[in-house]
Image (cartoon, rainbow, N blue to C red):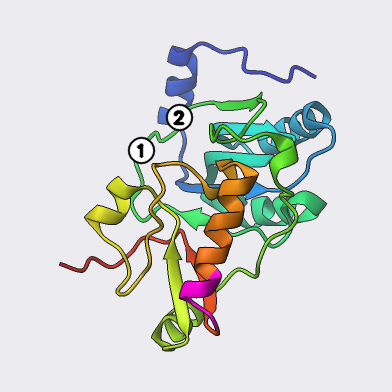
């Protein structure tokens, strides 16, 4: 089987124009160890092509990062397919609120060293060592608790535009705490413990409500 697109852009767009069904656009990323990225990529490409999906997906040993669309009538099959992979089970998926006519016109899956250019080495962290994902209501209840501290892990530019009320923004120059040296991490962790002793601490990567 050919595991890459063989049609021209003109042919692909013409095919999209002739479709009589709607497509749903979605995105997801997931940090998880993928031992054989190329085998994973080839199997996923074949199965997504069978479901007539289009999009751009990056696969690496550290996980997967995807933006794609699926024919509306294949949405349930896609979700079942993703959940059939041990690496992708129970993965949060974001669906587009507005649909462009041609968000993607072909399927591209590339194997890369990293799914996000964060400057970290694979040995710096274990992608399987994660906390529990909070639902919006759980997040809201915890953030209302006076013993809970929201730590905004975004860069200064993003947190300056808007953040959750009373969120703490670490004084880090646009780089992940994981990219700090070990002595710097030690100092950072101890300052965090001293400042918020006895509090529940959880990180925020959600879109914040603006406070002015």
- Asked whether the beta carbons under mark 1 and mark 2 sit within 8 Å of each other, the answer is yes
At a point 66% along the width and 50% down the height, the residue shown is 78
At a point 60% along the width and 41% down the height, the residue shown is 181
Report helix, strand or loop for mark 1: loop
Q: CA distance from mark 1 to mark 2?
A: 9 Å
Q: Is residue 132 above or below residue 158?
A: below
**On residue 16, which mark appears?**
2
Question: Would you call the spot at circle 2 few (<14 residues within 10 Å), some (14-19), or many (20 or more)?
Answer: some
**On residue 88, which mark appears?**
none
At a point 64% along the width and 49% down the height, the residue shown is 30
Report helix, strand or loop for mark 2: helix
Whether residue 21 sits left or right of residue 64 in the image: it is: left
Question: Residue 34, image x and y in percent?
Answer: 79, 40
Question: Residue 73, image x and y in percent?
Answer: 57, 52
Question: Residue 145, image x and y in percent?
Answer: 44, 88
Relative depth, front residue between 12 and 58: 58
Residues shaded magenta? 193-197
Which residue does the numbered mark 1 point to in the structure image? 101
Magenta stretch secondary structure, dominant: helix
């Amino acid at each position: 089987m050919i595991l890459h697109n063989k049609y021209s852009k003109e042919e692909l767009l013409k095919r999209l124009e002739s479709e009589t069904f709607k497509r749903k656009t979605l995105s997801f990323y997931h940090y998880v160890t993928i031992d054989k990225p190329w085998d994973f990529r080839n199997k996923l490409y074949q199965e997504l092509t069978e479901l007539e999906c289009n999009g751009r997906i990056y696969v690496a040993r550290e996980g997967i990062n995807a933006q794609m669309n699926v024919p509306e009538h294949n949405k349930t099959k896609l979700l079942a397919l993703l959940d059939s992979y041990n690496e992708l089970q129970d993965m949060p998926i974001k669906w587009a609120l507005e649909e462009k006519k041609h968000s993607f016109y072909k399927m591209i899956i590339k194997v890369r060293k990293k799914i996000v250019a964060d400057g970290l080495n694979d040995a710096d962290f274990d992608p399987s060592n994660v906390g529990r994902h909070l639902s919006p209501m759980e997040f809201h209840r915890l953030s209302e608790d006076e013993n809970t501290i929201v730590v905004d892990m975004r860069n200064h530019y993003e947190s300056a535009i808007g953040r959750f009320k009373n969120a703490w923004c670490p004084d880090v120059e646009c780089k992940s705490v994981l990219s700090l040296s070990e002595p710097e991490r030690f100092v950072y962790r101890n300052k965090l413990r001293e400042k918020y002793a006895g509090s529940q601490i959880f990180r925020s990567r959600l879109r914040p409500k603006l406070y002015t």
